[in-house]
Amino acid sequence: MVKEVHAAHILVKSDKKAKEVLDKLNKGLSFTEAARKYSDCPSGKSGGDLGWFGKGRMVPEFEKVAFEGDKGKLFGPVKTQFGYHLIKVLDKK
């Protein structure tokens, strides 16, 4: 059973913007660079890295994807009360 997830994300205000950033990622832009350039979250400065977190630390929509998604994969756009996230699951333990 997964107890903690290490994830990074890019947060933007619209589904349209999230899809534009996802398209750039799919064309080879690095996740770290995209987070620094496009993310509205303060974590964007550190490439979107959110560090390790356990259940109950993130909003439910985000947490579900982070805990159920496969390590190394990119997910999204995922809508939450904060906007639209592109989520990269970096590791699990």
Image: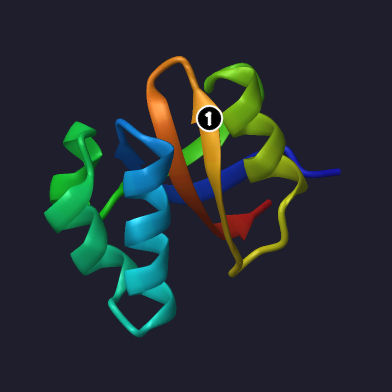
* Residue 50, visible in the rendered structure: no
* Residue 8, visible in the rendered structure: yes
Q: Residue at x 41, y 62 (%)?
A: 22
| Residue reaching furthest to the front | 16
Q: Which is more toward the observer, 60 or 18?
A: 18
Q: Is residue 64 above or below residue 44?
A: above
Q: Is residue 62 above or below residue 34?
A: above
> Where in the figure is residue 43, as x and y percent of width and height?
23, 40
Q: Residue at x 53, y 29 (%)?
A: 79
Q: Residue at x 65, y 54 (%)?
A: 92
Task: Find numbered disc 1 in the image and state the secondary structure of the residue it sits on.
Answer: strand
Quadrant position of residue 4: top right
> Where in the figure is residue 62, as x and y percent of width and height?
58, 31
Q: Residue at x 13, y 48 (%)?
A: 45
Q: Which is more toward the observer, 40 or 58?
A: 40
Name the quarter where the N terminus is drawn.
Answer: top right
Q: Amino acid at mark 1?
A: Lys
Quadrant position of residue 56: top right
Q: Which is more toward the observer, 48 or 61?
A: 61
Q: In the shown orientation, is residue 69 left or right of residue 22?
A: right
Q: In the shown orientation, is residue 37 left or right of residue 43?
A: left
Q: Identify the coloring.
A: rainbow
> Where in the figure is residue 11, as x and y percent of width and height?
33, 38
Residue labelled with disc 1: 79
Q: Is residue 54 above or below residue 69?
A: above
| Residue reaching furthest to the bottom | 28
> Where in the figure is residue 65, as x and y percent of width and height?
67, 41
Quadrant position of residue 66: top right
Disc 1 residue crowd, few under 14, some 14–19, many 20+, Cα 10 Å: some
